Amino acid sequence: MVCPAPRAAGRQKTLSASKTIRRLTMSTREFLLRAERLTKKVSSPEGELTILDSVTIGVPQGHTAAIVGPSGAGKSTLLALLAGLDEPTSGKVWLNGAELTALDEDGRAGLRNREVGFVFQSFHLLPSLTAIENVLLPLELASTANASPRARQALVDVGLEHRLRHYPKQLSGGEKQRVAIARAFVTGPSLLFADEPTGNLDNKTGAKILDLLFDLNKAAGTTLVLVTHDLDAARRCQHMIELEGGRVVEAT
């Protein structure tokens, strides 16, 4: 069950003279992803707006969780905070034992590069790169050994061995999302965020993409957090986190 994570004692792990990450020892369960009392407020002409209000959740290692709720409920904001793409007004996030919210921008980026994969609704492929070059990119940025064979195998795993040298404009929507999924998994992330991964696809193609996403996730043992309006997709997850008005109204 997705639930408030237990409190744990902190310890310090020094990565370098200038970088320190606070690490946790979980007392009863392993939560790969944990958020405690996350709040996000923004200023507007009408005054201060609360986008997220004291959200506390925990997702165990290797589990799948869906974040659902109506438009404006705070789903995308929560994902951005959980991934360290944005900073909360208050509250904390831990990813694989490291306190993400204690890091500066460079530290958060480094942790994301090591631990996280992303699949977006709009694919986010670089148009000037071929399919295999798009998948190669995160491996090359990390100076990963045997990058080319890994990228090729990742595309084989999503059924695109015949599209290695094709550019995004030459691919269908479903094929673009397959490339994006290959890119997300190729680095071996411990956590995968999928933000409305079928939102730009027709129902038939979307169903195939979801099948592929869940099959690859199960095979890799990755923790999956899926943001979706599709309740059928959400029900495929082991856990569901429902947001409304920036608050968790139900977590199973």
Image (cartoon, rainbow, N blue to C red):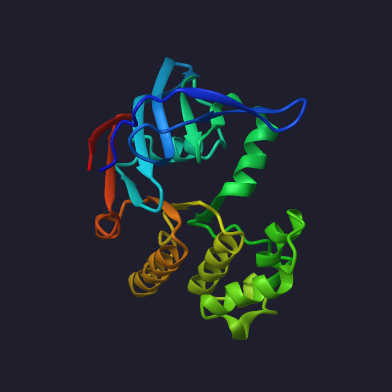
- Whether residue 121 is visible: yes
- Residue drawn at point x = 41 percent, y = 31 percent: 35
Which of the two residues, 29 or 78, is positioned nearer the viewer here? 29
- Residue drawn at point x = 67 percent, y = 78 percent: 166
- Counting labels gives 0
Residue 79: quarter of image: top left
Taking the image as shown, residue 107 lies to the left or right of residue 16, namely left
- Whether residue 72 is visible: no
Q: Where is residue 165 in the image (x, y as percent from the top left)?
A: 70, 79
Q: Where is residue 245 in the image (x, y as percent from the top left)?
A: 30, 29
Query: Against 145, is 193 above or below?
Result: above
Taking the image as shown, residue 174 lies to the left or right of residue 57, namely right
Query: Against 177, is 24 above or below?
Result: above
Which quarter shows the N terminus?
A: top left
- Residue drawn at point x = 62 percent, y = 81 percent: 163
Q: Where is residue 25 in the image (x, y as percent from the top left)?
A: 46, 31
Which of the two residues, 228 or 23, is positioned nearer the viewer here? 23
Which quarter shows the C terminus?
A: top left
Residue projecting furthest to the bottom? 162
Query: Against 44, is 169 above or below?
Result: below
Taking the image as shown, residue 26 lies to the left or right of residue 84, namely left
Q: Position of residue 19 (x, y in %)?
A: 71, 28
Residue 100: quarter of image: top right
Residue 171: quarter of image: bottom right
